[in-house]
Image (cartoon, rainbow, N blue to C red):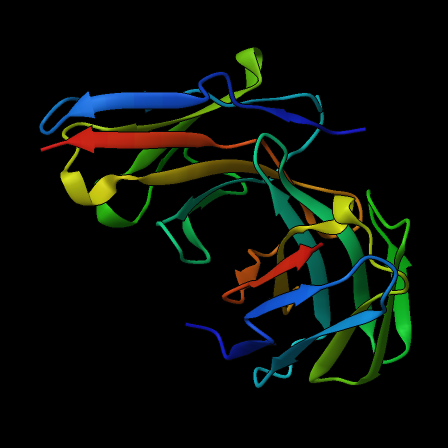
């Protein structure tokens, strides 16, 4: 069964620091990968997705992610975080039922 | 934002009572999903539907049933609520124009079972 691992449970950064959140998936075949963000008290929103093509994917709000097939990784990055990026971030892989399989999430706290 | 409405937004109920959560969409999407979100577990799929009257189980379906009599409505029923079902429940929809299309989520229902 496919699975997703997010290694960092809680990341604390100061504003303007660079961000990288790790995500590894288990399936070795063709994968569709996603990053979602959940701001406090809100629902999940799509940040970016990878289906095929350029392994460097750019999303909304200045986020990007790089698909590295050899490492089964899809890490999320942002060069300079803002206080408004405080949220929980979920990596997900497309499942065989058309659903998404989510990692356990990484909470990001950005100190002003 | 996709037109997804979950009701109720908050509910407190007692152990052993039945509870029904409703997800209503205005997007005419074929696929609908129920997830639960728990600290340390992320989101886990309970049930999903791929059309009217067509549903299937997800990863954590025990103690839950669903029904979809119309395209726009997907109901989740806890047959006899237990404290372990205290959670935040999210409905999601997808048009599956392409395989593994992104899901669009509702605002969630926070359920507390006492």
Place of residue B107 in the rendered image (x, y in percent of width and height, measured from the top left)? 49, 66
Q: Classify residue B109 as left or right of residue A44.
A: right
In front of the other: A109 or B68: A109
Residue at (55% x, 55% y) in the render: B102
The C terminus of chain B: image quadrant: bottom right
Quarter occupied by residue B78: bottom right
Relative placement, left or right, of B24 versus A49 is: right
Q: Is residue A89 visible?
A: yes
In front of the other: A15 or A112? A112
Comparing B102 with B75, the one in front is B75
- Residue A100 located left or right of residue B15: left
Is A109 above or below relative to B36? above
Q: Is residue A19 visible?
A: no
Q: Percent x, y for residue B14?
A: 77, 62
The quadrant the N terminus of chain B occupies is bottom left
Residue at 83% across / 58% down in the picture? B81
Extreme residue in the top direction: A71
Q: Toward the viewer: B99 or B113?
A: B113
Percent position of residue B75, x then y: 77, 75
Instruction: Give the mark count.
Output: 0
Find residue B20 and report its image quarter: bottom right
Quarter assignment of residue A76: top left
Task: Find residue B111 and report its horizontal and vertical position in percent.
Answer: 64, 60
The residue positioned 73% from the left and 42% from the top of the image is A95
């Amino acid at each position: 069964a496919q699975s997703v691992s997010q290694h960092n449970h809680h990341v604390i950064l100061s504003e303007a620091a660079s961000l990288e959140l790790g995500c590894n998936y288990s399936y070795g075949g063709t994968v569709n990968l996603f990053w979602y963000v959940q701001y406090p008290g809100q629902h999940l929103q799509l940040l970016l997705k990878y289906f095929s093509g350029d392994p460097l994917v750019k999303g909304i709000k200045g986020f990007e992610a790089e698909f590295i097939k050899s490492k089964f990784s899809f890490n999320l990055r942002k060069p300079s975080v803002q206080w408004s990026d405080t949220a929980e971030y979920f990596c997900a892989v497309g499942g065989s039922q058309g659903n998404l399989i989510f990692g356990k999430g990484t909470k990001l706290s950005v100190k002003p | 934002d996709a037109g997804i409405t979950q009701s109720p937004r908050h509910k407190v109920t007692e152990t052993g009572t039945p509870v029904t959560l409703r997800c209503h969409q205005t997007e005419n999407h074929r696929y609908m999903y129920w997830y639960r979100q728990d600290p340390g577990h992320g989101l886990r799929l309970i049930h999903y539907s791929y059309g009217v009257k067509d549903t299937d189980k997800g990863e954590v379906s025990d103690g839950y049933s669903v029904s979809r009599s119309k395209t726009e409505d997907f109901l989740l029923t806890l047959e006899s609520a237990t404290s372990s079902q205290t959670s935040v429940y999210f409905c999601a929809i997808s048009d599956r124009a392409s395989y593994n299309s992104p899901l669009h989520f509702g605002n969630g229902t926070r359920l507390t079972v006492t």
